[in-house]
Amino acid sequence: MFERIFVAATLIASTHAAFAQAPEAPGKPLPPGPMQAKVKAACTQCHNTTRIAEQHFSRVKWSDELDKMAGLGASVPDSERKDFLDYLTKNFGPQKGAPKATPKGAGPQ
Ligand code: HEC
């Protein structure tokens, strides 16, 4: 009985931790580049880098995402918007980590 409660509590705690993502938690490292420091400064005030690094967005989607983040309070200067987009699309674009196409006839897995 006690064990069950313990397991449930541990599960809840770990699920919660996965979603909490405090900005000060290390998060996935941002790839190096001229924009690394700027993205880190502008984009890790509210969540850590994992929020960004786990995405595989197209340029258009990153552009929407920048609008969304700006709406939430992120500051991306107009003059640097293109550089943010370049960096994000290059490092977290659709091709990065995309699952390999299932060979024809392999069927659903
Ligand atoms: C003012 C706080 C704040 C800043 C600064 C901020 N974000 Fe966010 N971000 C959020 C919030 C809040 C969410 C969760 C939004 C939701 O659940 O709809 C989020 C979620 C995300 C997501 C996950 C997808 C989504 O829309 O939920 C990505 C990717 C992201 N942010 C990227 C960025 C990038 C890139 C920057 C820097 C340009 C940035 N964020 C700066 C608050 C912020």
Image: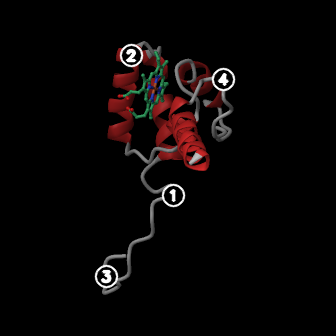
Residue located beneath label 4 in the image = 24
Do the CB atoms of the residues marked 2 and 3 lie less than 8 Å apart? no
Name the amino acid type tagged 2. Leu
Q: For the residues marked 1 and 3, what is the alpha-carbon distance in whole angstroms?
A: 21 Å
Evaluate whether residue 87 shows in this view.
no
Q: Residue at x 32, y 77 (%)?
A: 108
- Mark 2: C-beta under 8 Å from nearest atom of ligand 1: yes
Q: Residue at x 31, y 87 (%)?
A: 105
User: Viewer-nearest of labels 4 and 1?
Assistant: 4
Residue located beneath label 1 in the image = 97
Residue located beneath label 2 in the image = 72
Name the amino acid type tagged 4. Glu
Image location (x, y in percent) of residue 43: 53, 24
Q: For the residues marked 4 and 1, what is the alpha-carbon distance in whole angstroms?
A: 25 Å
Do the CB atoms of the residues marked 4 and 2 lie less than 8 Å apart? no
- Mark 3: C-beta under 8 Å from nearest atom of ligand 1: no
Residue located beneath label 3 in the image = 107
Do the CB atoms of the residues marked 1 and 3 lie less than 8 Å apart? no
Is 29 located above or below residue 76 in the figure? below
Ranked by sequence position, the earlier of labels 4 and 2 is 4
Ranked by sequence position, the earlier of labels 4 and 1 is 4
Q: Is residue 8 left or right of residue 31?
A: left
Image location (x, y in percent) of residue 29: 67, 39
Image location (x, y in percent) of residue 96: 50, 55
**Rendered-image quarter of ligand 1:** top left
Is 54 located above or below residue 34 in the figure? below
Q: Nearer the viewer, residue 82 or 54?
A: 54
